[in-house]
Image: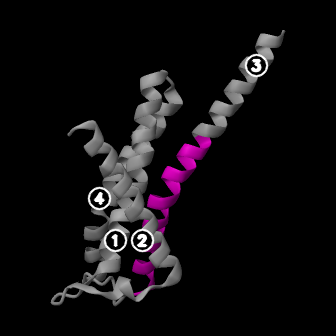
Amino acid sequence: MKIYQRGLWHVLLVMLFFLNLYFLLTASDVLLIAVIKEPYVPLGNLMSWASLIILPYYAYLFFRWVLQRESAMLGMFFLRINYLVLFLAAAWGVISYLTFGNWAFNNSRGDVYRENWTLLTAAIVIIPLLSVLSYGFWALIQFILRKLKAKR
């Protein structure tokens, strides 16, 4: 893939992520549009699935970029964690289908299933965010310590 095509691809992914975030926050009726009538597959589920993949994907790319510039064990740890989360995000739709028995993810099997599914979804969102923020905080501390050491 050529560099301008890659750039366009990243712009489209980011736009899709923020468009989905907007639709979710505004509870738009667009999310209820049936992509497939039977079995009922709402557009919102596919967009959410794509967004759940995009978030760990960019965290993974960030840590690959970090490891190209420096050899940090913390960066390698977060890279592997985000690789695992990316795999879980890619399987999220299938896991959701197996959990609820339908593609609309309507809860028909009880609260325990809903709680476990909510924890999985939250982990897919929170782990990439926390890993990037934690690494950023660690890098900031390292930068401050180097500046203080250089002043001595």
Mark drawn on residue 20: 2
Residue receiving disc 4 = 90
**How many angstroms separate mark 3 from mark 4 (CA)?**
42 Å
- The Cα–Cα distance between marks 2 and 1, rounded to whole angstroms, is 6 Å
**Could you tell me if the residues under marks 2 and 1 are in contact, i.e. CB atoms within 8 Å?**
yes
Residue 123 visible in the snapshot: yes
Residue highlighted by disc 3: 147
**Which mark's residue is nearer the viewer, 4 or 1?**
1
User: Residue 35, image x and y in percent?
Assistant: 22, 82
Mark 3 surroundings within 10 Å by alpha-carbon count, few (fewer than 14), some (14 through 19), many (20 or more): few
Most foreground residue, 97 or 129: 129
Contact flag, marks 2 and 3 (Cβ < 8 Å) = no
Q: Which of marks 4 and 1 is nearer the N terminus?
A: 1
Mark 2 or mark 4: whose residue is earlier in sequence = 2
First reached walking from the N terminus: tag 2 or tag 3: 2
As helix, strand or loop, the secondary structure at mark 1 comes to: helix
Please check the rendered image and state whether residue 59 is part of the magenta-colored stretch, yes or no.
no
Q: Is residue 67 positioned above or below 99 on the image?
A: above
User: Does 58 sit above or below residue 32?
Assistant: above
